[in-house]
Image (spheres, helix red, strand yellow):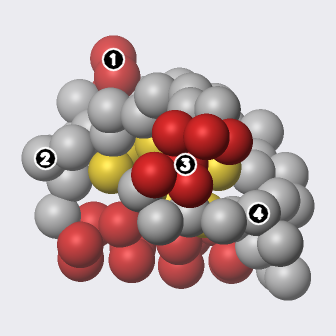
């Protein structure tokens, strides 16, 4: 059951990064993506499980992430 007190409006735009709680199931992330695509056809977003932190380029390189 959805807790309606927890419902918030999303203004998702193409290219957004969405961070969901780290205990979110993969299936629930898929449902969210499908709902977003229904509401905003063609919108491309990235959905990740949190928490997220901002890293500088050097830290990202140490983790194997390279900017193209």
The mark closer to the camera, 1 or 3, is 3
Q: Nearer the viewer, residue 6 or 43?
A: 43
Q: In this view, does 38 lie above or below 66?
A: below
**N-terminal-most mark, 1 or 3:** 1
Drawn side of residue 36 relative to residue 5, left or right: right
Badges 3 and 4: C-beta atoms under 8 Å apart? yes
Residue occupied by mark 3? 60
Decide: few, some or many residues near mark 2? Use Cα within 10 Å; few <14, some 14-19, many ≥20.
Answer: few
Badges 1 and 3: C-beta atoms under 8 Å apart? no
CA separation in Å, label 4 and label 1: 40 Å
The mark closer to the camera, 1 or 2, is 2
Residue occupied by mark 1? 5
CA separation in Å, label 1 and label 3: 37 Å
Residue occupied by mark 4? 67
Q: Residue at x 83, y 72 (%)?
A: 68
The mark closer to the camera, 4 or 2, is 4
């Amino acid at each position: 059951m959805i807790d309606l007190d927890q419902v918030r409006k999303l203004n998702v735009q193409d290219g957004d990064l969405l961070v969901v709680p780290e205990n979110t199931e993969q299936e629930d992330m898929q449902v969210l993506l499908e709902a977003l695509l229904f509401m905003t056809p063609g919108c491309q977003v990235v959905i990740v499980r949190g928490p997220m932190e901002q890293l500088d380029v050097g830290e990202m390189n140490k983790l194997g992430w390279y900017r193209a």
